[in-house]
Amino acid sequence: MLRLIKREPSAILLAVQLSGVLLYPLMEGPAGRALFSVFGIIVLALVVLAVRATPAFTWFAVMLGAPATVLLVIQAVTDSDALLPYSSAFEAVLYFYAAGALIAYMLADHEITRDELFAIGATFTLVAWGFAYVYVVCQAIEPGSFIAALEPAADRTWMELLFLSFTTLSSTGLSDVIPVEAFARGVVMIEQLAGVAYIAVVVSRLVALTIPRRA
């Protein structure tokens, strides 16, 4: 297993994150708060390993991941989400840094490996997770930044914010979670631009590299 993680870290990271999409609903509520923190620590470790395989600086990823891990451990032990905005801030920066590192890894040469193909999906999920953590921070700083059809006055759950991030980044616009405050809307617009740019620039170039060239 360790050999597979070292050989194809992007594939493992993508698989774990996609598994999290299905597992997160089971972790909502006070009973699953500790599991949520433990799962976050596992993902953080995989993110650092993915950065290690790229041209980016691994030490910088460790500097971001270490305080986030400490905060997640405290949340798991105390069974409290009081530190969630602070850990989310570190995680957001780490996820964006890792996404940039994977993009540099994919565009470093003109040959596409199997792990680089998985990195296409892993980069997308990293950006989606990163913006979801930004939304958590926005909601903590300015309560009521997001509303939904059900319980509009309540704070949005992690799954709701992650769903908003995925639908915004993919430009599908299917989310029933709506930003209502000015700053939250600004962040959503930036994510929309990031999603369009990722498809237009990164994915299109990688698809072009997979097409055999005539001699």
Image: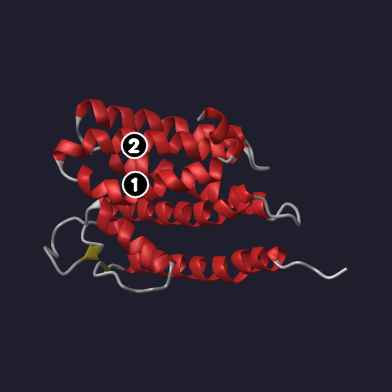
Identify which amino acid the numbered label 2 is placed on: Phe
Residue 184 appears in the rendering: yes
Q: Are marks 1 and 2 in contact (CB under 8 Å)?
A: yes
Vertical comparison of 78 with 185: above or below: above
Around disc 2, counting alpha carbons within 10 Å, would you say few (fewer than 14), some (14 to 19), or many (20 or more)?
A: some
Mark drawn on residue 213: none
| Secondary structure state at the residue bearing disc 2 | helix
Foreground pick, 74 / 101: 101
How far across and down, in percent of the image, does residue 72 sit?
33, 33
Q: Is residue 152 above or below residue 172?
A: above
Residue 95 in the image, given as x and y percentages of width and height: 48, 47
- From the viewer's perspective, tell me whether residue 70 is left or right of residue 2: left
Left or right side of 56 for 164: left
Can residue 186 be seen at all in this image of the molecule? no
Q: Mark 2 — residue?
A: 39
In three-dimensional space, the C-alpha distance between marks 1 and 2, rounded to whole angstroms, equals: 8 Å
In this orientation, which residue lies closer to the viewer: 25 or 128?
25
The image shows residue 104 at horizontal and vertical percentages of 66, 52
Colour setting: secondary structure
Q: Position of residue 174 (x, y in %)?
A: 31, 72
Q: Secondary structure at mark 1?
A: helix
List the residue tagged with mark 1: 20
Q: Quadrant of the C terminus?
A: bottom right
